[in-house]
């Protein structure tokens, strides 16, 4: 495999002909694990489609599934950083709970009391900013105790899980809080909470161009330095597959439509006759997830911070001997978790349109499961952000699919638990065979 | 051809003042004196071998110099100036690089990631510049180990010699003036050991000052100008290599006695 990676352009064809499918895959430099996850997700979706007699893979179902998975996946991206650096965060569910309650209290009571009335411009954004600040502050506090005081993260965040959930009760005086800004409800993806057909195509096209551009730029840079590059066919296959996937998903999502009541409001603006269906496209929570995934992946792979997270996970001694401020690195991972919990809380509270006392309950389990199914190793140093997002979708597809074909909630939990263990067992097996890549 | 070139006197010259002086260094762990009032120095272009049994305090002493261990008391001077080395970053600032016995590599990162760990090259906007780092890694590895090709693989999948090469490359890439090598050949085969020995000679000729920590008396005799022997946290003696025999050094390591104080019986015991 080593010499395949080093192939000069002249050797490409010869090697490609000699190689089996496994080394063909290696030449595209796709993480085989990520490839496996996409395949598993596909099998699950198609499997439920067949079992349900061909009704499961409808755009409307996929919208619901996407919204449900987004709330978990957003936090899972940060959980990767936490687990990679040999820690854990059990407090995410309670953090979602407290920030959700802060959002609701702000919009229902506090902001008005401060003279920021319901018609104040960008009122929703003020609430969002404060909520994110609250999340970051809780994250920083826990991160400080873990990194600088030296209390194990399991203990600190277990304490956080209990005490922060208690604070939610005090904050709301034991009652659910309603009265959100209409704009805030868009975060939940319900009603008019989708970006619409035109923008969905725009996202698909911009995404495709970005992928082609990145592939091209990467190849040019490697050529400049005289490094070996992927064979050209692999670049083309990779680019074409990615573009087809993005545009295909965009087209598919545009087959979901706004409720006719909302569609007619849009029709009234565009001059189309009432009753014309209007494509809804991607729901806002899914778009939020896309942005979060890109940003956290960028942090993890293109910034020093991310490099230090992985280095610490791989060998904490090596990281400190290299002069890395390991404590600050750990603290930052928890600040990021706080911010991501606040974003997830916006999705949750927007979707329910009310902050209940138990909002976010047991998120920690689903988030950790998503990260682990997505290939994050508790041994530290190994895990990818796109993997965790896929992991969240795998777990959510399973739960949603089982519910769809009429399996009750206990049955869903049994299946989820078994899949979690199987995924990690498969991981251990492939790693023993040495076919794993780290990132 | 002139004969003066043949003498191989290192650039910088051993006659100049010490580049490193460690004076009266003490480190204790819960009442145990790991390093007990040790003074040692090192001149440019010189290799000082630091030998001693397990737990003699060699590694702890070197950790003080590399910033991995704070001393309880004592003074470090670089080029005659007293300096405070509180952490590894400080040490690197003074041109002190260390190759640890454990290599201190992040197993999950690739060779460029490890070589530049903590000192990543970045683009104008602060993004990690992997291509530039790979380019530099290819250049420096080309010098150390021309067969090295695995630039994109996590170092956990490399051989012992390749991992060692990455650790050495990291130490010499940043223009070290002072190099600490802790058991540099312990995990290597004969061919790779010879490579490392040649490298040490080459670095010495470039004027780099080297502390060589080793169990291997032959390595130390072959490569060092002076040899310091530690025993139970103290320096037994620092001797010129040409003034002692390997037996005398062994006597110092095992019995903690300076050469003049060895008895005939001691020497007989060592030889078994």
Image (cartoon, coloured by chain):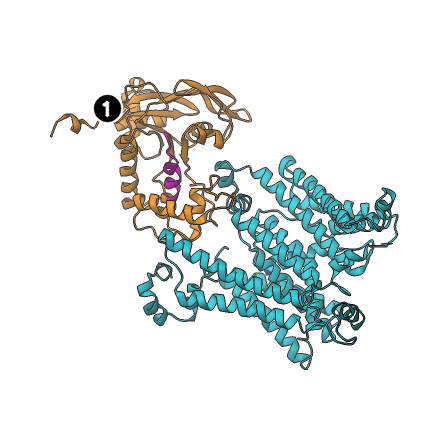
Q: Judge by depth and name the residue closer to the eye, A35 or A126.
A: A126
Give the quarter of the image for residue B192: top left
Q: Against B16, is A439 above or below?
A: below
In this orientation, does residue A168 appear?
yes
Tell me, by letter, which chain the rendering colours cyan: A
Image side of residue A207 versus residue A3, left or right? right
* Bounds of the magenta segment: B166-177
Q: Nearer the viewer, residue B161 or A134?
A: A134
Viewer can see residue B183: no
- Towards the viewer: B17 or A408: B17
Q: x%, y% of residue B170?
A: 40, 40
A122 over A67 or under it: above or below: above
Q: Is residue B105 left or right of residue A265?
A: left
- Assign the magenta stretch its main secondary structure: helix
Is residue A415 rendered magenta in the image? no
- Residue B174 located within the stretch drawn in magenta: yes
Residue pushed farthest bottom?
A53
| Disc 1 packing (10 Å; few <14; some 14–19; many ≥20) | few
- Count of labels shown? 1
The chain letter corresponding to orange is B
Q: Which residue is mark 1?
A: B242
- Residue found at the far left of this picture: B1
């Amino acid at each position: 495999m080593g010499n395949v990676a080093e192939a000069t352009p002249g050797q490409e064809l010869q090697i490609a002909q000699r190689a089996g499918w496994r080394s063909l895959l290696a030449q595209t430099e796709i993480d085989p694990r990520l490839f496996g996850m996409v395949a598993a997700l596909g099998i699950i979706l198609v499997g439920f489609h067949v079992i349900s007699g061909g009704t499961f893979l409808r755009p409307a179902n996929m919208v619901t599934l996407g919204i449900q998975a987004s709330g978990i996946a957003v936090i899972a991206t940060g959980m990767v950083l936490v687990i990679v650096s040999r820690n854990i965060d059990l407090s995410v569910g309670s953090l979602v709970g407290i920030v959700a309650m802060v959002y609701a209290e702000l919009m229902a009571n506090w902001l008005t009391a401060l003279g920021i009335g319901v018609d104040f411009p960008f009122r929703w954004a003020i609430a969002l900013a404060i909520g994110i600040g609250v999340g970051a502050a809780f994250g920083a506090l826990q991160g400080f105790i873990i990194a600088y005081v030296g209390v194990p993260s399991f203990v600190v965040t277990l304490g956080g899980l209990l005490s922060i959930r208690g604070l939610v009760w005090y904050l709301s005086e034991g009652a659910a809080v309603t009265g959100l800004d209409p704009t805030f409800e868009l975060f939940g993806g319900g009603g008019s909470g989708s970006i619409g057909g035109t923008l969905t195509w725009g996202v698909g096209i911009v995404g495709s161009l970005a992928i082609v551009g990145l592939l091209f730029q990467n190849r040019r840079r490697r050529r400049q330095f005289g490094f070996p590059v992927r064979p050209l066919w692999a670049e083309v296959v990779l680019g074409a597959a990615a573009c087809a996937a993005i545009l295909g998903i965009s087209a598919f999502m545009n087959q979901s439509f706004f409720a006719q009541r909302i569609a007619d409001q849009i029709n009234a603006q565009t001059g189309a006759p009432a009753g014309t269906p209007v494509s809804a496209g991607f729901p806002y929570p899914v778009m939020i997830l896309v942005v979060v995934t890109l940003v956290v992946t960028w942090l993890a792979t293109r910034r020093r911070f991310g490099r230090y997270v992985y280095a610490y996970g791989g060998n904490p001694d090596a990281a400190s001997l290299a002069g890395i401020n390991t404590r600050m690195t750990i603290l930052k991972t928890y600040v990021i978790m706080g911010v991501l919990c606040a974003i997830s809380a916006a999705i949750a509270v927007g979707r329910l349109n009310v902050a209940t006392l138990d909002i976010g309950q047991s998120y920690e389990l689903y988030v950790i499961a998503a990260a682990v199914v997505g290939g994050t190793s508790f041994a530290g140093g190994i895990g990818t952000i796109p993997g965790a997002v896929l992991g969240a979708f795998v777990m959510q597809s399973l739960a949603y699919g089982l519910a769809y074909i009429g399996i009750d909630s206990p049955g869903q939990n049994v299946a989820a638990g078994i899949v979690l263990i199987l995924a990690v067992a498969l991981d251990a097996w492939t790693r023993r065979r040495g076919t794993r890549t780290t990132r | 051809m002139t004969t003066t070139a043949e003498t191989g006197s290192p650039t910088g010259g051993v006659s100049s003042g010490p580049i490193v002086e460690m004076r009266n260094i003490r480190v204790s762990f819960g009442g145990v004196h790991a390093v007990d009032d040790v003074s040692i120095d090192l001149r440019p272009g010189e290799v000082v071998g630091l030998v001693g049994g397990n737990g003699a305090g060699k590694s702890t002493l070197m950790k003080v110099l590399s910033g991995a261990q704070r001393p309880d008391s004592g003074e470090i001077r670089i080029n005659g100036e007293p300096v405070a080395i509180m952490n590894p970053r400080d040490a690197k600032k003074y041109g002190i690089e260390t190759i640890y016995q454990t290599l201190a590599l992040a197993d999950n990162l690739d060779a460029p990631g490890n070589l530049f760990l903590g000192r990543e090259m970045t683009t104008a906007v602060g993004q990690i510049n992997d291509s530039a780092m790979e380019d530099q890694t290819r250049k420096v590895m080309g010098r150390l180990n021309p067969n090295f090709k695995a630039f994109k693989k996590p170092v956990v999948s490399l051989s012992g010699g390749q991992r060692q090469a990455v650790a050495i490359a990291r130490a010499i890439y940043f223009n070290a003036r002072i190099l600490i090598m802790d058991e540099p050949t312990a995990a290597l085969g004969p061919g790779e050991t010879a490579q490392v020995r040649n490298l040490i000679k080459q670095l010495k000729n470039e004027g780099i000052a080297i502390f060589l920590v080793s169990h291997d008396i032959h390595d130390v005799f072959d490569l060092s100008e002076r040899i310091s022997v530690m025993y139970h946290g103290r320096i037994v003696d620092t001797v010129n290599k040409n003034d002692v025999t390997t037996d005398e050094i062994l006597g110092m390591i095992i019995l903690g006695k300076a050469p003049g104080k060895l008895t005939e019986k001691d020497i007989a015991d060592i030889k078994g």
